[in-house]
Amino acid sequence: MGKTTLLLWLKEFLESRGKKVVYIAADEYRDRELFGSATLFLKFLEYEYGLKRNMNILIDEFQYIKQAGIFTKTLRDIIKRKKMKINIIVSGSSSLEISRNTEFLTGRKIEFLLSPFSFYEYLSPDKRFSHKFNLHNEFEDIVDFYLIYRDELKQRFVSYIRWGGYPEVALEKENERRKILLKEIISTYIEKDITGFLRVENISGFNKLVRLLSAQIGALVNKNELSNTLNLHHKTLTKYLNILEGTFIFSFVTPFYRNIRKELSKMPEVYINDTGIYYYFQPQNLLLFDSIAGNVVENYVYNTLKGMKGLNSINFYRTIAKSEIDFVLRKGEITIPVEVKFRSKVKVPVSIKHFRERYKTEKSIIITKDEIKKEKDVYFIPASILGLIEI
């Protein structure tokens, strides 16, 4: 997922500046008493690495440590008591376990979420695509940039959509090698690590759930239908859905309501956090820009929007009268409806007009296949340039 690569890079970076660094993969010690107590762990560091009063400890696969929260808190307390200047940096693959274990470290920790590459990050090594435009202040520049680089943006967009943003896959140039890497990620991370570590009893049902959700991205998640289709008990299904969200495979988007209780009580929509996984389960050897399915583009738009700075929330909008808007962004006091229309000819949907009248929005955004323009306060933005824009 990139976290191990990041920790090893950090190790190299710190060592290049004369810092003492120890990297330990917790999963390699799962059958040993190394993490049985903080005191024993410090003894191990002393015997194995020559414990220093000023050093950095990098622990990968944090979730494999039993009672990791208590262990880390005790370790930190000992370090503080002995007045040692030791930094502890841990990584893990499950927000469920990390959140549960770091409850003991409230006020003593800083958390970072490491996501797959965004399309912007995928493009940014090329200096031409390393600038982000402000939608409101630089729209004319956005139009010019798109007209100049439209074909290249589309080409790279297709590659990113097809293979996703997991660093090792995204940086690989050969498609056959990409297939192998994606298969490795799925088989080891989803089908082995998650099911084994989080004690998934019905592995077959869990894997079928992953495939079924992948096939219906952008659709409502009806627990009753899923439970009946997969023959899973309702509680078991809920547990598996929580695992898939907590291990960053899927996201579940709730509907837009002013009443938060209503918002949380309605069926959510499902999106996959990396479209490379989607195409692993829905194979397509040749993907062309014009043949990308609308729900896949919608999935990409969701992943791009959720990575933007300053957003309070992302929801979808659906009324009893079937008026629908793909996403509603809340940024401070501002509400912005976003509709995805991946087609040749696009006009402002009636649902957007009604929403604007009802909620008095300042601007609206329509994500298109190729059309780029502004009509009053409605912005038409091609999907392939969205990642280079700050809303």
Image (cartoon, rainbow, N blue to C red):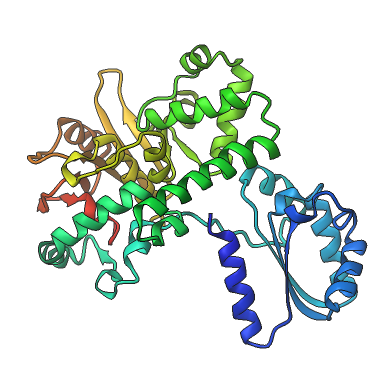
x, y percent for residue 207: 54, 29
Q: Is residue 13 left or right of residue 359?
A: right
Q: Is residue 83 visible?
A: yes
Quadrant occupied by the C terminus: bottom left
In the rendered view, tell whether residue 313 sits above or below residue 211: below
x, y percent for residue 140: 12, 65
x, y percent for residue 137: 21, 66
**Residue 131 lies in what quarter of the image?**
bottom left
Residue appearing at x 18%, y 51% in the figure: 382
**Residue 148 lies in what quarter of the image?**
bottom left
**Residue 14 lies in what quarter of the image?**
bottom right
x, y percent for residue 352: 20, 36
Nearer to the camera, 202 or 133: 202
Q: Is residue 103 left or right of residue 47?
A: left
Residue appearing at x 51%, y 26% in the figure: 209
The residue at the far left in this view is 345
Nearer to the camera, 226 or 386: 226
Q: Is residue 187 left or right of residue 317?
A: right
Q: Is residue 263 visible?
A: no
